[in-house]
Image: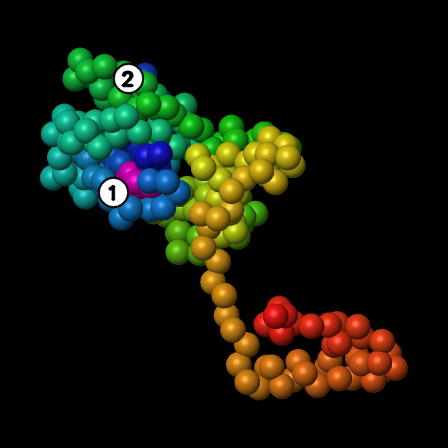
Amino acid sequence: MRQIFLDTETTGLNPESGDRIVEIGCIEMVNRRLTGQSRHVYLNPERKGSEEATKIHGLTDAFLADKPKFAEVAEDLIEFLAGAEVIIHNAAFDVGFLNAELKRLRLQPFHTVAAKVTDTLAMAREMFPGKANSLDALCRRLEVDNTHRTLHGALLDAGLLAEVYIRLTRGQDSLVIQQHDQAPDTPQELQARDLAQYLLQVIDANADELAAHEVILKELDKSSSGKTVWRSMETPSAVA
C-alpha cells in the first residue's frame, strides 16, 4: 500500500478569490514504513501574500520571488502522487487549492490523480468528538514531538502528520500489524490468524539470572513444605 502525506502553505484562505499555493510538502510511506522519498517545493504564487498567512508560515514575497511557479513542478508532482492514497489534515482546504492550480493549467482535478484522499481531521473528529483536533492538538494527545514547530512548514507538517496517522491507526509499535492495517473483525478471526510469519526476538537468560531464578524456586519450595510439584516433574530431556 503506497501512501503520501501531503501539506500545503498558501497566500491566504480562499483559492476562489485568487489565493495561491506557496509551498508543497509530500512524504511517502509504503506498507506503513516511511521510504525516505519525498517532494518539497517553494512556489512563486505570482501574487502578494496576506500578512496573516505570512505570520503563519514565514514565507515572504521576497523569499518566494525567485522560486518556480506551479506550472514548472506540476508534472513531477502529479507523477509522484499518481495512484497513491493521499493523506491530508483538513483535506478540503489543500485539495481546493490544488484543484485551482490544476484548473489554471487545464489539467484534470486532483481526485483523478490520487487513488484515494484520506482526511485525518475527519478521522480525528470521529475518534475524539468534541475535542480540539488540529495537528498540534493531535501531536499533544498522541505524544508526537512537535516542539521544533515554531512556524507552519509543508514538509515539516507532512512529517508530523505521518507520525500522527500511524498512531491514529494503531501505530508501528504494535506487536502485530495486520495486513492492510485492518484489525480482525472478531476474536475468532484473531485466534485463527497465523502468527508464524512474525519473528519475535528470544533472549536467553545469562548465568547470573539463572542462578537468581534457582534461588527463588528453592525459597518457594521451602515455604510450601516441598509441595512445588514442578520441581519433581521430569523434564522433556529426561524422558526416554
- Predominant SS along the magenta part: strand
Q: Which quadrant holds the N terminus?
A: top left
The secondary element bearing badge 1 is classed as strand
Label drawn at residue 112: 2
Q: Residue at x 28, y 17 (%)?
A: 112
Earlier sequence position, callout 2 versus callout 1: 1
Q: Position of residue 36 (x, y in %)?
A: 27, 48
Residue sitting nearer the eye, 120 or 17: 120
The residue identified by callout 1 is 38
- Direction from residue 124 to residue 172 in the image, left or right: left
Q: Which amino acid lies under the numbered mark 1 shown in the image of this protein?
A: Ser
Mark 2 vs mark 1, CA separation in Å: 21 Å
In the displayed structure image, the side of residue 108 where residue 65 appears, left or right:
left
Please tell me which residue is depicted at 39% across the width and 32% down the height of the picture. Answer: 88
Quarter of the rendering occupied by the C terminus: bottom right
- Please indicate, yes or no, whether residue 131 appears anywhere in the rendered image: no
Residue range (magenta): 25-29
Query: Observer-nearest residue: 146 or 220?
Result: 220
At label 2, which amino acid type do we have? Thr
Q: Is residue 82 visible?
A: yes
Pinpoint residue 199: horizontal percent, then vertical percent: 45, 55
In which quadrant of the rendered view does residue 52 lie? top left
